[in-house]
Amino acid sequence: MLTSVVDSVYSRDFAELVEPLPPDIRELTARLVALVAAHPGLSGKVAKGWKAVNFRHAGAGHVCSVFPQQDRVALYFENGRLLAQGEGLLRGDGLKKGRYLRLQPGDDIPVDTIGILLSEAIALFA
């Protein structure tokens, strides 16, 4: 599964991003990136300096980023403070405008909630 997602989504840049991480984090990152990349209107790019995959929308600009770390993966919403549909999942009350969803290996990815949050984030600025 990981190989096909990596090959089809971001190939070499993505593989280099996740290579130093544990296998379960690589798999979780690939699943989350594939989910976000499938959302209509979003295009993603590996940002090596940020160690993330950034997603943009033509009308809304930078919408979100996936940040893999050694023990978790964060989905950061650039304007997360403005999102109403976090269902208690978004963290980052100390941040000025962004909020993030933190996932760990074994967590269920809240597919429907992420889809709603992405749609809401795009609608704010598109």
Image (spheres, rainbow, N blue to C red):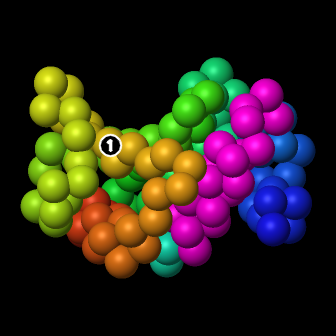
Q: Which residue is mark 1?
A: 100
Residue most extreme to the front:
106
Query: Circle 1: is it few (<14), some (14-19), or many (20+) Cα within 10 Å?
Result: many
- The type of residue carrying mark 1 is Tyr
User: Looking at the image, which is closer to me, 14 or 90?
Assistant: 90
Task: Identify whether 12 is placed above or below 41.
Answer: above
In the rendering, at what x and y percent does residue 84 appear?
11, 61
Taking the image as shown, residue 64 lies to the left or right of residue 82, namely right
Q: Quadrant of residue 119?
A: bottom left
Q: Is residue 24 rendered magenta in the image?
A: yes
In magenta, the rendered stretch is 19-38
Measuring 34% from the left and 48% from the top, which residue is drawn there? Answer: 101
Residue at x-position 88% and y-position 44%: 12
Q: Nearer the viewer, residue 10 or 75?
A: 75
For the C terminus, give its image quadrant.
bottom left
The answer to whether residue 83 shows anywhere in this view is no
Q: Residue 20 vs residue 3: left or right?
A: left
Secondary structure category for the residue under label 1: strand
Is 2 contained in the magenta span? no
